[in-house]
Amino acid sequence: MRSTLRAIRRTWAKWFHWCNGSCTVCSDCLFLPEIQFNAVASAIIFTQACHCMNTLIQHHIGHFEAFFNGSPWYGSNYSRIIDSLTEEEANWWPPYGHSIHGLLLHMIKWRKSLSERLLGNMDFVATDNDPDNWPEAEAIQKMNWVDTKAEFARQQKLIVDALRDKDDAFLEEDFLPGKKFGWLIQGVIDHDIYHLGQIATVRGLIRASA
């Protein structure tokens, strides 16, 4: 029996070698799965799996990281666009729509709807009618652009760090009846990408009219 288990562990070691340090939790790949034999079921049971198997979670983390400061398929990342803006540009209000500062505050609002729940605050509620969803221009003018950018970066770290502690099974858990975390996570990053495109468009309008 012991020789069988040793052979299986060697096989798993080779199987996991594909990771090669590329995943965000690769240090965990240094251990091998604990294996036990269930005599009743006559089956091998793997009681611990390498984090590299959580491919869906890693996929979501990759999307958040690419969006923030990586190389996304759709073009410039968040940091490249936001860091190029002055506070005056961020607070410029177009004839129709929202300022860049307002758009970023809106993005933070819905990132919080994810980060709070990932941290265990399942009572957190966010609605379209909340005053901090689309703050009035007067309120935004009183806010500090640097602080708003720092809060977005803080939300980025909270979300990515929390996701690293989750496995793929977590994505199938409900955060509200009938609504799963996988759907929320994907929705938030899609929402970010959508509004980043708006921010880039407003920036273009500002600079074209300068």
Image (cartoon, grey):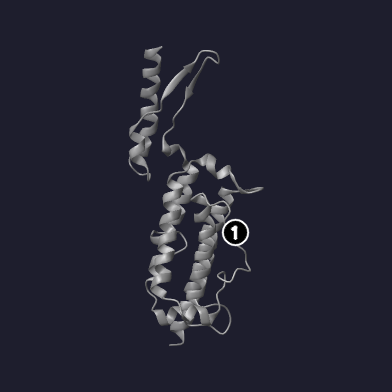
User: Residue 99's spot in the image, x, y percent?
Assistant: 51, 78
- Seen from the viewer's position, the closer of residues 59 and 38 is 38
Q: Position of residue 194 (x, y in %)?
A: 54, 65
Of the pair 184 and 194, the residue shown nearer to us: 184
**Image point (59%, 59%), residue name:** 125
Report the residue at 41% width, 75% height from top: 145
- How far across and how far down the image is residue 141, in percent? 47, 81
- Amino acid type assigned to the residue bearing label 1 in the image: Val
Q: Which residue in the protein does label 1 denote? A: 125
Image quarter (top left, top right, bottom left or bottom right) of the N terminus: top left
Say if 50 sits above or below 116 in the image: above
x and y percentages locating residue 140 in the rendered image: 49, 78
| Above/below status of 4 relative to 49 | above
**Which corner quadrant holds the C terminus?**
bottom left
User: Which quadrant of the view contains residue 64?
Assistant: bottom left
- Name the residue at the right extreme: 178
Q: Is residue 58 visible?
A: yes
Vertical arrangement, residue 126 with respect to residue 18, above or below: below
Residue at screen point 39% across, 76% down: 85
Say what secondary structure mark 1 lies in: loop
